[in-house]
Image (cartoon, rainbow, N blue to C red):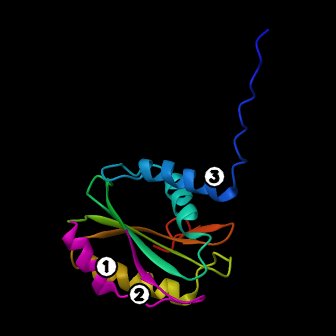
């Protein structure tokens, strides 16, 4: 009679492990050259990247003229309720990446994704600045704890 040996069971998977694996999957989907066709996928990616941050982070996704990803940059880091955003730096990197379009994104650590007046003003400034270089701003997405707000969907672009 043969003895059966029990294989040691795997330890339970933690929430952090699941999130890490999800980020790895999304990173593969949002690699250089990937065409942005579904706004919902972009929002999912940004939620995983930004929703749990304890401070504001302002990011830019640089795209070519066919909306293929050239680069995703976390450009500015702020405090729990604000960050300083410099359009000049966004333009500089857009030209460096030879971008034709961008998607702006930032998180609200407070949990509410409702855009502030300052969010709307900086979006307008960035849009005006990039227009001088023939670079389109496709959207500005604000990430809250549970909800997201797309400026394009709200007609704020």
Circle 3 sits on which residue?
18
Q: Which residues are magenta?
A: 73-97
Q: CA distance from mark 2 to mark 3?
A: 32 Å
x then y, percent, for residue 121 = 46, 88
Farthest residue, direction top: 1
Q: Mark 1 near mark 3, Cβ–Cβ under 8 Å?
A: no
x then y, percent, for residue 21 = 56, 50
x then y, percent, for residue 78 = 50, 88
Q: Secondary structure at mark 3?
A: helix
Viewport quadrant of the N terminus: top right
Q: CA distance from mark 1 to mark 3?
A: 32 Å
Q: Secondary structure at mark 1?
A: helix
Depth check, front residue: 10 or 123 = 10
x then y, percent, for residue 84 = 44, 91
Between disc 1 and disc 3, whose residue precedes?
3
Q: Secondary structure at mark 2?
A: loop
Q: Which mark, by number, is residue 153?
A: none
Q: Mark 2 near mark 3, Cβ–Cβ under 8 Å?
A: no
Between disc 2 and disc 3, whose residue precedes?
3
Viewport quadrant of the C terminus: bottom left
Decide whether residue 89 is among the magenta residues: yes
Q: Mark 2 near mark 1, Cβ–Cβ under 8 Å?
A: yes
Q: Which mark, by number, is residue 85?
A: 2
Depth check, front residue: 110 or 149 = 110
Mark 2 crowd level (few <14, some 14–19, many ≥20, 10 Å Cα): some
**Residue at point 35% right, 67% down?**
102
Q: Which mark, by number, is residue 90?
A: 1
Q: Is residue 4 above or below residue 6?
A: above
Q: Is residue 86 above or below residue 48?
A: below
Q: Is residue 18 above or below residue 56?
A: above
């Amino acid at each position: 009679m043969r003895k059966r040996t029990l294989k040691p069971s795997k330890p339970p998977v933690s929430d952090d492990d699941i999130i890490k694996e999800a980020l790895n999957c999304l990173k593969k989907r949002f690699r250089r050259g990937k065409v942005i066709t579904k706004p919902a996928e972009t929002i999912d990616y940004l939620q995983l990247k930004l929703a749990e941050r304890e401070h504001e982070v302002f990011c830019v996704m640089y795209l070519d003229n066919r909306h293929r990803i050239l680069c995703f940059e976390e450009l500015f880091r702020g405090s729990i309720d604000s960050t300083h955003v410099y359009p000049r730096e966004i333009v500089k990197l857009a030209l460096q990446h030879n971008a034709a379009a961008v998607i702006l994104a930032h998180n609200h650590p407070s949990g509410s994704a409702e855009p502030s007046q300052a969010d709307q003003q900086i979006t307008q400034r960035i849009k005006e600045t990039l227009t001088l270089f023939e670079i389109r701003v496709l959207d500005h997405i604000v990430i809250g704890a549970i909800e997201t707000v797309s400026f394009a969907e709200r007609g704020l672009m």
